[in-house]
Amino acid sequence: MSCFRFSNQYYVAGLRMEYKAIYEKMRKGTTTLGIICDDGVVMGADSRATMDTFISSQEAIKVYRINDSLAMTIAGGVGDAEYLIKLMNAQNQLYEMEEKKNMSPRSATSLMSIILQENKMYPFMVQLLLAGFTNGVPELYDMDPLGGYIKESTFTSSGSGSLTALGYLESAYKDKMSIQEGVKHAAKALGIAMKRDSATGGSMKIVSVTKKGYREYTKEEIEKISKT
């Protein structure tokens, strides 16, 4: 029995190393970000999808509306990420039917953490950002593939272009930033990532979640706000 355990431990370790290697390859191919503002949360991402050095699409969707109080960004394996988005949408509908209110970022993060933890032997190759409102307070969570998460109080970014995006946000972020300022800095951070990271590109999608609900900004609106 002890020999079986010993062998099984090596087998599990080997699987985890293999999946870690796959995740390291798959995570390098996007830039997503979230910014806490005084009156809400701003989230954004590029639209480029890559397969190693090959650009497979310039129209990938990486920011999703779950409900009027909750948005989610994805990075990593497309199949895994889309499955989790569908699962979260289904869970949100069930939650709304039972609780008669929107699922909050805190509840969604707790649920997603359980789902990812239950599958850690064969983990989803994703990194997720969830943000929105909990009891009228803007919240932002950064999640890893095994269900671990960090509640961010200012901003965060994921993907291969995150280093350049974070570098810009470190210098630009300030307390009590307005949503318009958040959109402006999100666009700037994504623009810098697109210039410096070959796996980040295409167009940018920027949204906000405020007390008024979920809003997606058009290309023209982003360009106008960026000039202010």
Image (tube, grey):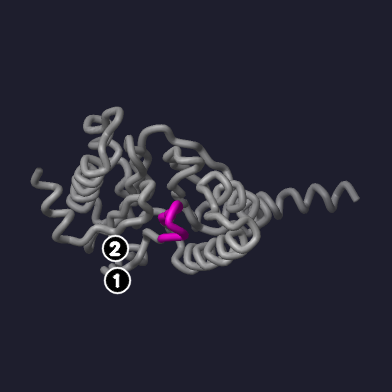
Q: Quadrant of residue 11?
A: bottom right
Query: Could you tell me the amino acid type at mark 1?
Result: Ser
Residue 212 is left or right of residue 106, and the answer is left
Residue 52 is left or right of residue 185, and the answer is right
Nearest the eye: 203 or 222: 222
Residue extent of the magenta highlight: 65-73
Does the image show residue 162? yes
Residue 64 is left or right of residue 174, and the answer is right
The question of residue 71 being in magenta is answered with: yes
Q: Which mark is residue 74?
A: none
Q: Quadrant of residue 61?
A: bottom left
Magenta-drawn stretch, dominant element (helix, strand or loop): strand
| Residue 198 point in image, percent of width and height | 24, 56
| Residue 125 point in image, percent of width and height | 51, 58
| Mark toward the start of the polypeptide (2 vs 1) | 2
Query: Could you tell me the amino acid type at mark 2?
Result: Ser
Instruction: Assign a secondary structure to mark 1.
Output: strand
Look at 57% across and 43% down and name the residue there.
Answer: 148
60 lies above or below 150:
below
Instruction: Assign a secondary structure to mark 2.
Output: loop
| Residue 138 point in image, percent of width and height | 42, 40
Q: Which mark is residue 57?
A: 1
Residue carrying label 2 = 47
Label 1 near label 2: C-beta < 8 Å?
A: yes
